[in-house]
Image (cartoon, rainbow, N blue to C red):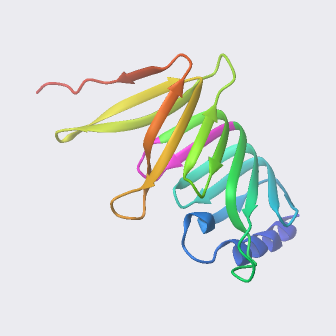
């Protein structure tokens, strides 16, 4: 089984990672079980995906292929990624988001995160207050996000957020010196 997984990783590496854009931003995929159909990659069990915007963990994922115009590319490019069960995304900017399900569009850089009651979608980040980082926690039943490329061109961060259902924002006041 380990040998089969290694062959699959070589196949994915050879077909997924061409030009450096968001559709080709997958750098590593790991899971207990993998099923490749040509248009989709189904991953189950301890799923871990390294993506240009960060590291993704979940119980199950489906990576959908983007279809290139005829003659442009025959490689597998990710258009969408659907995530299920204990979803955690650790962004390279240090923030993280936790949910039960997530639906990511790799082309538009939009995502929808949902939680099943009594769980909440939780986004952990920080604000800069003068020279101090202030922890911020946002929770809601559902969270829609839009990402943008960071100033250095290598990091991605949430540029727009819309929480729905029992939205709560908590932040820690910086200590006065």
For the point 42% across and 64% down, the residue is 154
Residue 92: in magenta span = yes
- Relative vertical location of residue 118 with respect to residue 96 in this rendering, above or below: above
Give the percent coordinates (x, y) of residue 83: 71, 44
**Residue furthest left in the image:** 177
- Relative vertical location of residue 81 with respect to residue 78 in this rendering, above or below: above
- Relative vertical location of residue 124 with respect to residue 70 in this rendering, above or below: above
Give the percent coordinates (x, y) of residue 77: 69, 67
- Which corner quadrant of the image does residue 72 belong to? bottom right
**Residue furthest bottom in the image:** 71
- Which corner quadrant of the image does residue 39 belong to? bottom right
Give the percent coordinates (x, y) of residue 174: 22, 27
Count of numbered tags: 0
Residue 117: in magenta span = no
Give the percent coordinates (x, y) of residue 160: 44, 40
Q: Which residues are magenta?
A: 86-95
Residue 50 versus residue 159: which sits nearer the camera? 159
For the point 39% across and 65% down, the residue is 153
Quadrant showing the C terminus:
top left
Quadrant showing the N terminus:
bottom right
- Relative vertical location of residue 4 with respect to residue 173 in this rendering, above or below: below
Q: Main secondary structure of the magenta part?
A: strand
- Which corner quadrant of the image does residue 34 belong to? bottom right
For the point 40% across and 37% down, the residue is 125
């Amino acid at each position: 089984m380990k040998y089969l997984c290694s062959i699959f990783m070589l196949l994915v590496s050879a077909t997924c990672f061409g030009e450096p854009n968001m559709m080709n931003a997958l750098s590593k995929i790991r899971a207990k079980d993998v099923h490749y159909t040509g248009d989709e990659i189904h991953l189950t069990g301890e799923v871990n995906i390294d993506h240009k915007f960060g590291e993704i963990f979940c119980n199950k994922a489906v990576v959908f292929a983007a279809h290139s115009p005829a003659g442009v590319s025959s490689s597998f490019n990710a258009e969408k990624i659907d995530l299920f069960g204990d979803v955690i995304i650790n962004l390279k900017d240090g923030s993280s988001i936790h949910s039960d399900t997530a639906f990511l569009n790799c082309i538009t850089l939009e995502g929808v995160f949902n939680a099943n009651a009594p769980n909440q979608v939780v986004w952990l980040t920080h604000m800069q207050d003068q020279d101090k980082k202030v922890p911020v926690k946002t929770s809601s039943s559902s969270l829609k996000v839009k990402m943008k490329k960071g100033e250095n061109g290598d990091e991605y961060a949430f540029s727009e957020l819309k929480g729905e259902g029992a939205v709560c924002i908590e932040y820690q006041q910086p200590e006065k010196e």
